[in-house]
Image: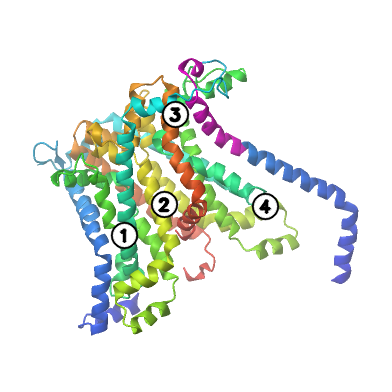
Amino acid sequence: MAPTTFSTRSSGTGRTKPRDSGRVAQRIAVYVLITALAALFTVPFVWLVSTSLKSPAQVFVVPPQWIPNPFVWDNYPRSTTFIPFWQYFRNTLYVTVFNVIGSVASCSVVAYGFSRIQWRGRNTLFVVLIATLMIPYPVTLIPTFLIFRDLGLVNTLNALVVPSFFGNAFFIFLLRQFYMTIPQELSQAAKIDGASEFQIFWQVILPLTRPALAVVALFAFLSNWNDFLGPLIYLSDKENYTLAIGLYGFFGRSKTEWGLLMSAATIMVAPIVLLYFFTQRTFIEGITLTGIKG
Amino acid sequence: MASISTRSKPKSQPLKPQARRDLIHGLVFISPWLIGLIVFAAYPLISSLYYSLTNYDILSPPQFVGLRNYIDLFTADPLFYKAVGNTFYYALISIPLNLLIAILIAMLLNTKVRGLSIYRTLFFLPSIVPEIASAMLWAWILNPQFGLANALLKAFGLNSIGWLTDPNWSKPSLILVGLWGFGGSVVIFLAALQDMPRQMYEAAEIDGANTWSKTIFITLPMLTPTIFFNLINGIIGAFQYFTAAYVLTGGQGGPAGSTTFYSLLLYRNAFSYFKMGYASSMAWLLFAAVFVLTLLLFKSSGRWVYYEGGDKN
């Protein structure tokens, strides 16, 4: 063994140069390719912000200008008065905040029941929970709409909020995976100290699973901030519109006001981008968790 | 299986106090979901099956018509076939393309590039942009006269394309828009790659494997569970594809019906024409299709999905 390794090594020294330069070329190729791809993904963002700072005349310049000259900041205040922006913003915030509260509250409790208590039928019901993930939303869309109509909730923001208080299969699954990793001894010790099941949930499990709750809160925020179909179906009066559906109306009415449209879109995207930069790790962990454990 | 069924017999006897307490606690804790399951899943499923056998315009009570809606869909509705075709077109091209590019990017990122988190951010960010905002942005980029896409083509001396106005280009354009937002799968694939055991590659290197054969014989097989997961998600997503097409065509599914996707047609039947029964039968056909496809994929997975320590399965 020893001689052969030695001989390959010695012959290796003679070849180091071509092999190293080959490796360097490979590295350069990787960087060129990945940077080019990343640029392709970034260009639309640049174009979004660039257009949002242009006057109507600048927007239609051929060939297009990348850097507006001059910068027209006026689009931003105008796009918030052109539509009742702040009202849409308040509505969106209402839907989003209550969905976050509802999802975190209901899913954490339900996930506890699916992971920290042993009871007959638990696994069967958990299979049912997973199966509901496969139901395409169009199947339940119409009856659900009719239920909300009978409850008098159509055309109210609460139609978009109420379901979150009854758990979300995906979030429950996610939290359960977390709860399963906590040693059972912790619960038993608390039980010996006389803690009730709810006290164990509240005082032992919840504090230990804050990162998982953050993932749920983040995803709930994101999906409701971005939701288009829900508001499209349930909200008909303009005063109830969320940003997504409000912007759609704006888009339909002013197809050529690209500067204004892009500034409104930028305002809607900005909170999401900010949120990403402040919670990057939670984001990536959450996405990773859902993909790998699934 | 046999052992479970024999064991379940004694269980039908009265429960011990502890087991009883646990059962009650368990049910209390999952009760929010249990109520939700009945109200927002079980009841809607059953009633939409019933509605699918009726004529129902919301204003007057549903009238039972048997299989009429299903028969009409297959024999009297050319738009139905158009929507099915469009949806398959979208799924068959966008899902493999998404997977291929996501895996490629994840592999490139996994070669210990510097600034990994910056690259990852750039690929990931578009996927969390609100669909309405990204649709507006792409409507502008793909604008036939003043859009960036045609300006680029012109710069290379090429003819401009009617991205969203030409029926031949409208679906490829929407696939392109979809590709922009697939960063989530890049992150998932990258995490899967980073999880792979080093030793296996080292062993292969000792045996003289080059980058190419390592990719084909180690990386790809080890990625199959992740590919499987993304494939199922992709199919369910493609069958429900709605928002971008709706926004970019003003809800019309044009030009010439070329972007009338299945869910778009269903939505229009239900909420524009108030043909709730007809739309419900479309919904159940969709459900059946998703169910069969998922089942087939699960059945086939034994043959191509590699599970670590998979002897148990």
Circle 4 residue: B112
Looking at the image, is mark 4 or mark 1 nearer the viewer? Answer: 1
Looking at the image, is mark 4 or mark 2 nearer the viewer? Answer: 2
Circle 2 residue: A218
Quote the CA–CA distance across marks 4 and 1: 40 Å
Q: Which residues are magenta?
A: A37-60
- Say whether disc 2 or disc 3 marks the residue closer to the N-terminus: 2
- Say whether disc 3 or disc 1 marks the residue closer to the N-terminus: 1
Of all chains, the one bearing label 3 is: A
Amino acid beneath label 1: Ala
Q: Is residue B74 visible?
A: no
Disc ID at residue A105: 1
Q: Regarding mark 4 in the picture, which secondary structure is present there? A: loop
State whether residue B62 is above or below residue A209. Answer: above
Residue under the image location 41 percent in, 46 percent down: B235
Disc ID at residue A263: 3
Amino acid beneath label 4: Lys
State whether residue A88 is above or below residue B191. Answer: above
Quote the CA–CA distance across marks 2 and 3: 25 Å
Q: Do marks 4 and 1 share a subunit? A: no
Nearest to the observer: residue A104 or residue A147: A104
What colour scheme was applied to this rendering of the protein?
Answer: rainbow
Residue under the image location 47 percent in, 26 percent down: A52
Of all chains, the one bearing label 1 is: A
Of all chains, the one bearing label 2 is: A
Q: Regarding mark 3 in the picture, which secondary structure is present there? A: helix
